[in-house]
Structure formats: C-alpha cells, structure tokens
Amino acid sequence: MKISGITLTPIQTHRRTGSISSHLILQMHTDEGVTGLGEISDLDCYRMYMPDVDAVRVGIEKIVLGRDPFAVEAMHVEMTKYLHNYFASAPSYPPFTPASQIAAGIDMACFDIMGKALGVPAYTFLGGKTRDRIEICYPLFQVKSEADYERNLGYVQDLLDQGISRFRYYVGVDFAKDEMFLAALRDRFGNRVELKALDFQARHYWKDTLRAYERLKPFGFDVIESPSWKEDFDGMAELRRRVDANVSEHVSSAAQAMQLLRAGAVDIFNITVVSGGLVQIKKLAALAEIAGLRCLIGTTQELSIGTAAQAHLGASMASLATASDPVGPLLYAEDVVKTRVQIKDNCIEVPTGPGLGMELDEDALENLRAPLVEWDRAAHGAGYVSD
C-alpha cells in the first residue's frame, strides 16, 4: 500500500461561546482505495502567520506521496527534514506550532489508514486498549467583565443538564474578577460542580501565581497549570515546593521534557496529539512513566477526528493522572463526521470502529468550507480569551 494523494480542506466552526475556530481537514488517499482522516486543529492562534493552504498541501505531498502509511516512524524521520524542530524542541505554551500540528495531522491519518486496512481500532498499534472511557473536564474561559459571570454560569448550567460537571478555569486576566466568579460558581452550584484545575496560561511570574493560588485555594482544585513564565523551570520548581496542588505543564518536545524533569518542576506532563502526533507523544508518556511522573491529555480543542485520536492515545496509556481536556465535540456547534465522538458523564467513549473510528460527512465538510481566517471577526486563540 502506498499513499497516492492528499485532499486538504479549510473549514470554520462555531464554538459554544460564539467565537469561530479554523481547521484543516486532511484526507490521505492510498492506491488501494483506503482513505485516512487527519485534522490540523483550531489554528486561530496563528492569525499573524496563518499557514497557506496550498503551500501546506504541497508540503505534505512532498513528505508522504509514494510512502507506506504503515511505516509511521519512518514518516516522522522524513517529516523532520521539512518540519524543523517540531518535536526536538518546541515552546511550552501554547504546546504546539504549525509544524507540530501538520505533523500530527499526517500521523493520525496514517493510523486511520492502518486501522481501516486491517479492520482494527487505532489503539491496537499503540499497545492496545487499557480503558474504554477517558475522564474529561470542560474549559471555562476567564471573565473580563461582570457580563461574563452570568454567561459562564449559564454555560455551566447547560453542561450540568448534559451530565458534564467537571471543569477547569482559565485565570489571570483579573484575579479579583476570578475570585468573584469562582465564589458565584460555588454559591449557585455548590458541590454539583467539580473544579479540576486553574490554568494560569504561563502569563505570570511564579510569585504572583503563588499569591493568586493562596487567594483562590478555598475554592478547591487539584491542579495548577502553566504557573510561570515560559521556560521558567526553576520558578516552577520553587512554586511546586510551596503548593499542595499538583503542578502541570504542557510538554511538547523531548528537550522540554528533559528540562522539566531535571528541574523537578512538575507533577504532571500535559501531553497532546497536536504536539506532533501519536508516535511522538507516546514517547513523552513513556518518559513520564519511567521518571515516576504522571500524564493528562491536553488539547487545543479538536473536532471529532482529532478528539478520536486523543481518545485512542488515552486508551493505550497505562495511567492518567487526572481528567483530560479534549471536549471539542461538546464545544463546537458543527463537525465534519457523521457521528461525533461520544462524550457523556464526564467521559469520552473510546471509538471502537476501524482506524480512528470516524466517518467523514462530505456534505458537512463542504458546508463548513471557508478561508482559514478573517480579520474582521473575533478570534479564539492566543491567550485563550473568548470574545
């Protein structure tokens, strides 16, 4: 079997918040009639340097055409010639780059082909399945004005009605407003809501994060995420020594993982398929296990194709430290598959169909086709502030 062609379709989808996210949907065709699906997800954080769709398609073709989709490790070796440093080194926040997301799209399409060709789920090639469901939590974006309080509380009520009761909250635009919102959340919902984590988004000096942690600790949470400036591993290590919560950081490259380990900066690796694909991210999971640390599965919020890849990753892992973050099929009003990844009772159901277990809806794909970005609309992306 050889890869014979690539179709790359830019689309836009609406979030529950009203903002719009841009994605590229990858179809990888083979000479035996099997087509694999991949996703290059939620690209709006690259608004100032958004990829050119035709250039990305040509680049992917240079990497994959004529190659064996089963030889995924060799494919990653080839990718390093074109997608420089996508796994060797990468930023900690956000935990991905255009190169790493393109690599992830190629990687997941290969796993989809492999599974479809042999009639088995993708997790078969990752060590097999250890669980049928992945615990998840839903993101609440930081409040910037009093109007945001009721809007966020309304989202929470809607989600509780759907059986989703575990959340993580982005803090740090205004800690006073964060405190008021979390108080309102507790007053209205009490222990019906579980607050898994506060995400500081690498915006703050670690001492400022420590002060905010002490201020917000009464609201009860298990994890603090990205608690110091980018690459301030020594500051993170000092913070970790002073807090009761687990410290988590996005880990998107081998070099960054080793720096975090040497500094003693984290309890949890936050790993995500969009940081380079299933092959590479399984290596980070193995490194964490060997080092005695734990993992959770992070996200940039994928549609069902990318969420399915995350679910297969989680299914193949021996342990997960805490609830993971991919909830795109709940977050987005639209999708490109006939049946979305199922999320209920705070869990993703691991797909059991061949490959990633997703079937493309060609009509939905065409209806959602759109330019990657428009400057006159609100963006979701850098800073993770929804408008």
Image: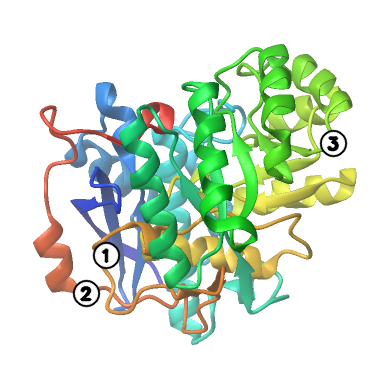
Foreground tag (3 vs 2) = 3
Name the residue at 55% across, 23% down: 175
Residue 4: percent from left, percent from top: 28, 63
Count of picture labels: 3
Along the viewing direction, whichever of 321 and 181 lies nearer the viewer:
181
Residue 36: percent from left, percent from top: 36, 68
Task: Name the residue carrying label 1.
Answer: 335
User: To which quarter of the image does residue 362 belong?
Assistant: bottom left
Contact, mark 2 vs mark 1 (Cβ under 8 Å): yes
Along the viewing direction, whichever of 2 and 220 lies nearer the viewer:
220
Foreground tag (3 vs 1) = 3
Task: Name the residue carrying label 2.
Answer: 361
Single out the residue that lies furthest toward the front. 187
Quadrant location, the C terminus: top left
Single out the residue that lies furthest toward the bottom. 119
Task: Name the residue carrying label 3.
Answer: 244
